[in-house]
């Protein structure tokens, strides 16, 4: 078996864990919304807050809280899952480029 180190392969190796990690952080962020008394500025919650907030802040300007509930982390999970599927899924762009 020969390992082909093409640009799409390297991109998939980098993007796979990165997108998967972001999805995990957004799911954790959803759980944190159930506990509004948690100070997200303090460790260990800041490890979830800081990587996700740059994506959620612009979303909040477009989609305000509905009935006092912030749904932007749910949208974040959807967006990053969609990106992961489009790029790395079975019919993803990077997957297809690896088989050309």
Image (cartoon, rainbow, N blue to C red):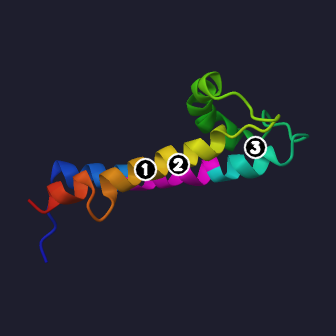
Q: CA distance from mark 1 to mark 3?
A: 25 Å
**Magenta part of the chain:** 16-26
Residue 55 in magenta?
Answer: no
Residue 78's mark? 2
Which of disc 2 and disc 3 is earlier in sequence? 3
Residue 82's mark? 1
94 relative to 89 in the view: left or right: left
Kindly indicate whether the residue at mark 1 contacts the one at mark 2 (C-beta within 8 angstroms).
yes
Query: Which image quarter: residue 5?
Result: bottom left
What residue is shown at x 62% (from left), y 49% (from top)?
25
Q: Secondary structure at mark 1?
A: helix
Q: Looking at this view, is 56 or 51 the one in front?
A: 56
Q: Position of residue 67 (x, y in %)?
A: 81, 35
Q: Secondary structure at mark 3?
A: loop
User: Which residue was labeled with disc 3?
Assistant: 45
42 relative to 1 in the view: left or right: right
Q: Looking at this view, is 15 or 89 the one in front?
A: 89
Q: Position of residue 71 (x, y in %)?
A: 69, 40
Query: Which image quarter: residue 41?
Result: top right
């Amino acid at each position: 078996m020969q390992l082909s180190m093409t640009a799409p392969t390297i991109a998939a190796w980098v993007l796979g864990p990165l997108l998967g990690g972001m999805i995990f952080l957004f799911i954790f962020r959803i759980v944190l919304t159930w506990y509004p008394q948690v100070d997200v500025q303090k460790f260990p919650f800041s490890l979830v807050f800081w990587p996700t907030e740059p994506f959620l802040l612009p979303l909040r300007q477009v989609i305000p809280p509905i009935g006092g509930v912030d749904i932007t982390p749910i949208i974040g999970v959807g967006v990053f899952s969609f990106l992961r599927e489009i790029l790395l899924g079975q019919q993803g762009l990077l997957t297809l480029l690896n088989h050309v």
